[in-house]
Protein backbone atom coordinates (compact mmCIF):
# COMPACT_ATOMS: atom_id res chain seq x y z
CA UNK A 1 0.00 0.00 0.00
CA UNK A 2 1.19 3.55 -0.74
CA UNK A 3 1.09 6.01 2.15
CA UNK A 4 1.77 9.72 1.70
CA UNK A 5 3.09 12.05 4.37
CA UNK A 6 2.71 15.82 4.03
CA UNK A 7 4.03 18.30 6.58
CA UNK A 8 4.35 22.05 6.95
CA UNK A 9 6.06 23.81 9.85
CA UNK A 10 3.40 26.31 10.86
CA UNK A 11 -0.37 26.47 11.07
CA UNK A 12 -0.38 29.39 8.61
CA UNK A 13 1.23 27.29 5.85
CA UNK A 14 -0.85 25.25 3.41
CA UNK A 15 -0.64 21.52 2.68
CA UNK A 16 -2.58 21.68 -0.61
CA UNK A 17 0.40 21.44 -2.99
CA UNK A 18 1.91 18.44 -1.17
CA UNK A 19 -1.52 16.78 -0.92
CA UNK A 20 -2.09 17.11 -4.68
CA UNK A 21 1.36 15.72 -5.53
CA UNK A 22 0.79 12.74 -3.24
CA UNK A 23 -2.64 12.09 -4.78
CA UNK A 24 -1.13 12.20 -8.29
CA UNK A 25 1.45 9.65 -7.15
CA UNK A 26 -1.40 7.30 -6.20
CA UNK A 27 -1.14 7.39 -2.42
CA UNK A 28 -4.09 5.53 -0.95
CA UNK A 29 -3.71 7.12 2.49
CA UNK A 30 -2.32 10.62 3.06
CA UNK A 31 -1.35 11.70 6.55
CA UNK A 32 -0.99 15.45 7.06
CA UNK A 33 0.68 17.39 9.82
CA UNK A 34 1.25 21.02 10.74
CA UNK A 35 4.18 20.63 13.06
CA UNK A 36 7.72 21.94 13.17
CA UNK A 37 10.32 19.70 11.60
CA UNK A 38 12.87 20.65 14.24
CA UNK A 39 11.16 18.27 16.68
CA UNK A 40 11.42 14.53 16.32
CA UNK A 41 8.21 13.71 18.20
CA UNK A 42 5.84 14.55 15.35
CA UNK A 43 2.61 12.74 16.39
CA UNK A 44 1.12 12.09 12.94
CA UNK A 45 4.42 10.88 11.49
CA UNK A 46 4.96 8.57 14.46
CA UNK A 47 1.44 7.16 14.04
CA UNK A 48 2.05 6.59 10.32
CA UNK A 49 5.43 4.93 10.86
CA UNK A 50 3.86 2.49 13.32
CA UNK A 51 1.18 1.55 10.72
CA UNK A 52 3.55 0.73 7.86
CA UNK A 53 4.12 -2.94 7.02
CA UNK A 54 6.54 -4.84 4.82
CA UNK A 55 6.11 -4.01 1.09
CA UNK A 56 4.36 -0.69 1.86
CA UNK A 57 5.73 2.50 0.33
CA UNK A 58 6.08 5.78 2.17
CA UNK A 59 5.89 8.76 -0.21
CA UNK A 60 6.97 12.33 0.63
CA UNK A 61 7.30 15.28 -1.71
CA UNK A 62 10.72 16.30 -0.37
CA UNK A 63 13.16 14.69 2.01
CA UNK A 64 13.01 17.59 4.46
CA UNK A 65 9.31 16.86 5.06
CA UNK A 66 10.40 13.58 6.66
CA UNK A 67 13.58 14.63 8.48
CA UNK A 68 15.39 17.86 9.27
CA UNK A 69 18.88 16.57 9.80
CA UNK A 70 21.14 13.83 8.53
CA UNK A 71 21.13 11.74 11.70
CA UNK A 72 17.34 11.70 12.07
CA UNK A 73 16.80 11.04 8.38
CA UNK A 74 19.16 8.09 8.31
CA UNK A 75 17.59 6.64 11.47
CA UNK A 76 14.03 6.95 10.15
CA UNK A 77 14.78 5.62 6.69
CA UNK A 78 17.04 2.79 7.90
CA UNK A 79 14.30 1.66 10.29
CA UNK A 80 11.89 1.63 7.33
CA UNK A 81 14.37 -0.33 5.20
CA UNK A 82 14.74 -2.88 8.04
CA UNK A 83 10.96 -3.45 7.95
CA UNK A 84 11.01 -3.89 4.17
CA UNK A 85 9.30 -0.56 3.51
CA UNK A 86 10.18 1.46 0.40
CA UNK A 87 10.72 5.22 0.60
CA UNK A 88 9.83 7.37 -2.39
CA UNK A 89 10.82 11.04 -2.36
CA UNK A 90 9.02 12.68 -5.27
CA UNK A 91 11.66 15.28 -6.11
CA UNK A 92 14.44 12.65 -5.89
CA UNK A 93 13.09 9.19 -6.66
CA UNK A 94 12.83 5.86 -4.95
CA UNK A 95 15.40 5.39 -2.19
CA UNK A 96 16.67 1.83 -2.10
CA UNK A 97 18.36 -0.27 0.55
CA UNK A 98 21.56 -0.64 -1.47
CA UNK A 99 25.06 0.76 -1.07
CA UNK A 100 24.41 3.46 -3.69
CA UNK A 101 20.92 4.13 -2.29
CA UNK A 102 22.35 4.69 1.20
CA UNK A 103 25.14 6.90 -0.19
CA UNK A 104 22.58 8.95 -2.12
CA UNK A 105 20.37 9.25 0.98
CA UNK A 106 23.24 10.36 3.22
CA UNK A 107 24.36 12.94 0.67
CA UNK A 108 20.86 14.35 0.23
CA UNK A 109 20.27 14.58 3.96
CA UNK A 110 23.62 16.28 4.51
CA UNK A 111 22.75 18.86 1.86
CA UNK A 112 19.30 19.43 3.41
CA UNK A 113 20.90 19.95 6.83
CA UNK A 114 23.50 22.32 5.37
CA UNK A 115 20.73 24.30 3.66
CA UNK A 116 18.82 24.59 6.94
CA UNK A 117 21.99 25.69 8.77
CA UNK A 118 22.67 28.33 6.10
CA UNK A 119 19.13 29.69 6.46
CA UNK A 120 19.63 29.97 10.23
CA UNK A 121 23.00 31.69 9.75
CA UNK A 122 21.57 34.20 7.25
CA UNK A 123 18.65 34.91 9.57
CA UNK A 124 21.01 35.53 12.49
CA UNK A 125 23.23 37.78 10.35
CA UNK A 126 20.20 39.79 9.24
CA UNK A 127 19.00 40.11 12.81
CA UNK A 128 22.47 41.25 13.97
CA UNK A 129 22.48 43.95 11.27
CA UNK A 130 18.95 45.04 12.14
CA UNK A 131 19.88 45.35 15.83
CA UNK A 132 22.47 47.98 14.92
CA UNK A 133 19.72 50.31 13.65
CA UNK A 134 18.46 52.85 16.17
CA UNK A 135 14.81 52.06 15.36
CA UNK A 136 15.23 48.29 15.87
CA UNK A 137 12.58 46.60 17.97
CA UNK A 138 12.49 42.87 18.76
CA UNK A 139 9.34 40.98 17.76
CA UNK A 140 6.39 41.67 15.56
CA UNK A 141 5.98 45.22 14.18
CA UNK A 142 3.48 47.32 16.05
CA UNK A 143 0.02 47.64 14.58
CA UNK A 144 -0.43 51.29 15.52
CA UNK A 145 1.94 54.17 14.77
CA UNK A 146 3.44 56.37 17.46
CA UNK A 147 1.07 59.19 16.44
CA UNK A 148 -1.99 56.93 16.73
CA UNK A 149 -0.92 55.81 20.20
CA UNK A 150 -0.28 59.39 21.33
CA UNK A 151 -3.71 60.42 20.03
CA UNK A 152 -5.41 57.52 21.83
CA UNK A 153 -3.60 58.26 25.08
CA UNK A 154 -4.63 61.91 24.80
CA UNK A 155 -8.25 60.78 24.37
CA UNK A 156 -7.93 58.77 27.59
CA UNK A 157 -7.62 62.01 29.51
CA UNK A 158 -11.29 62.77 28.85
CA UNK A 159 -12.77 59.39 27.87
CA UNK A 160 -13.02 55.86 29.26
CA UNK A 161 -11.00 52.94 27.90
CA UNK A 162 -14.14 51.54 26.26
CA UNK A 163 -14.84 54.83 24.49
CA UNK A 164 -11.26 55.20 23.29
CA UNK A 165 -11.28 51.56 22.16
CA UNK A 166 -14.37 52.15 19.99
CA UNK A 167 -13.00 55.44 18.61
CA UNK A 168 -9.49 54.17 17.74
CA UNK A 169 -9.79 50.41 17.38
CA UNK A 170 -7.02 49.94 19.97
CA UNK A 171 -7.97 47.48 22.67
CA UNK A 172 -7.77 48.30 26.36
CA UNK A 173 -4.78 46.01 26.96
CA UNK A 174 -2.74 47.74 24.22
CA UNK A 175 -3.65 51.15 25.58
CA UNK A 176 -2.62 50.14 29.09
CA UNK A 177 0.68 48.69 27.83
CA UNK A 178 1.54 51.81 25.79
CA UNK A 179 0.60 54.06 28.71
CA UNK A 180 2.92 52.16 31.07
CA UNK A 181 5.73 52.25 28.47
CA UNK A 182 5.57 56.04 28.41
CA UNK A 183 5.85 56.18 32.21
CA UNK A 184 9.01 54.06 32.30
Image (tube, rainbow, N blue to C red):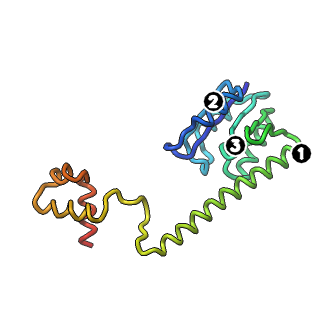
Q: Position of residue 5 (x, y in %)?
A: 65, 35
Q: Is residue 144 above or below residue 56?
A: below
**Mark 1: few, some, or many residues within 10 Å (few <14, many ≥20)?**
few
Q: Is residue 172 above or below residue 90?
A: below
| Residue found at the far right of this picture | 99
Horizontal side of residue 162 vs 76, given as left or right: left
Q: Of helix, strand and loop, which one carries label 3? A: loop
**Mark 3: few, some, or many residues within 10 Å (few <14, many ≥20)?**
some
List the residue tagged with mark 3.
62
Instruction: Estimate the spatial distance between the alpha carbons at disc 1 and disc 3, rounded to whole Å.
Output: 21 Å
Q: Quadrant of residue 173?
A: bottom left
User: Residue at left 63%, top 29%?
Assistant: 30
Q: Using the image, tell me which numbered label, if any, was put on residue 183.
A: none
Q: Using the image, tell me which numbered label, if any, was put on residue 30.
A: 2
Instruction: Estimate the spatial distance between the alpha carbons at disc 2 and disc 3, rounded to whole Å.
Output: 15 Å
Q: Position of residue 110 (x, y in %)?
A: 75, 55
Q: Nearer the viewer, mark 1 or mark 2?
A: 2
- Along the viewing direction, whichever of 83 and 165 lies nearer the viewer: 165
Q: Quadrant of residue 29?
A: top right
List the residue tagged with mark 1.
99
Q: Of helix, strand and loop, which one carries label 2? A: strand
- The quadrant of the rendering that contains the C terminus is bottom left
Q: Of helix, strand and loop, which one carries label 1? A: helix
| Residue found at the far left of this picture | 158
Query: Which badge, 2 or 3, is on the more N-terminal residue?
Result: 2
Amino acid sequence: MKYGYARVSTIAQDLAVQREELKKEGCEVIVEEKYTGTRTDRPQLNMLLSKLDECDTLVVTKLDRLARNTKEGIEVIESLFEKGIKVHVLNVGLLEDTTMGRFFLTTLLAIAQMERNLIIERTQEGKALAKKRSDYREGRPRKHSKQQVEHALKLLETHTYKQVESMTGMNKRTLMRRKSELKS
